Image: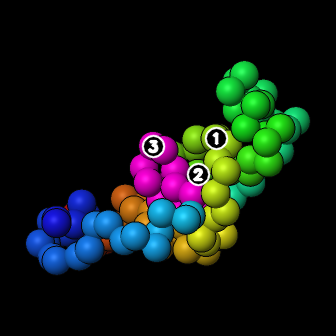
Amino acid sequence: MRCDHCKNRFLARTFDWWELTFARCPGCYRMDLSIWLSKDFEPPFWSKVKLVFGGHRWRCEYCRLNFVGLRKRKEIFSFKRWGKFQAPAEGRDRAPQDKP
């Protein structure tokens, strides 16, 4: 595998059998999910059917996707952890320029 940020190669397991019991975002496959409220989003027909059968309302804050899953979440999303993945502001990583 290769890191998207620093482009370094590393070895990692890409598939664990025990993680099949947890919900994943269908867009980016992350497992730290939050909950969306019914007043914020009107789900499509099949999502409503899943809700009737006990589905959970999950939201991926990284790709901003709302979905319904029948599995429980592994990890609760937190903005503190999200801040680690955000790129630094452009002005912060530059050195101050000398004035002529």
Tell me the tag on residue 40: none
Relative image position of residue 32 (x, y in whole percent): 57, 65
Q: Residues within 10 Å of mark 3 (few under 14, many from 20)?
A: few
Relative image position of residue 71 (x, y in whole percent): 64, 57
Q: Residues within 10 Å of mark 2 (few under 14, many from 20)?
A: many
Q: Which quarter of the figure has residue 41?
A: top right
| Stretch of the chain drawn in magenta | 23-33
The residue identified by callout 2 is: 60
Tell me the tag on residue 67: 1
Looking at marks 3 and 2 on the same chain, the residue that comes earlier in the sequence is marked by: 3
Q: Is residue 46 above or below residue 23?
A: above
Looking at marks 3 and 1 on the same chain, the residue that comes earlier in the sequence is marked by: 3
SS label for mark 1 = strand
- What's the distance in space between the residues labelled 1 and 2, CA to CA? 8 Å
The residue identified by callout 3 is: 27
Residue at 66% x, 69% y is 76
Name the mark nearer the viewer: 1 or 2: 1
From this viewpoint, is residue 97 visible? no
Taking the image as shown, residue 81 lies to the left or right of residue 93, namely right
Q: Nearer the viewer, residue 8 or 10?
A: 10
Residue at 69% x, 58% y is 34
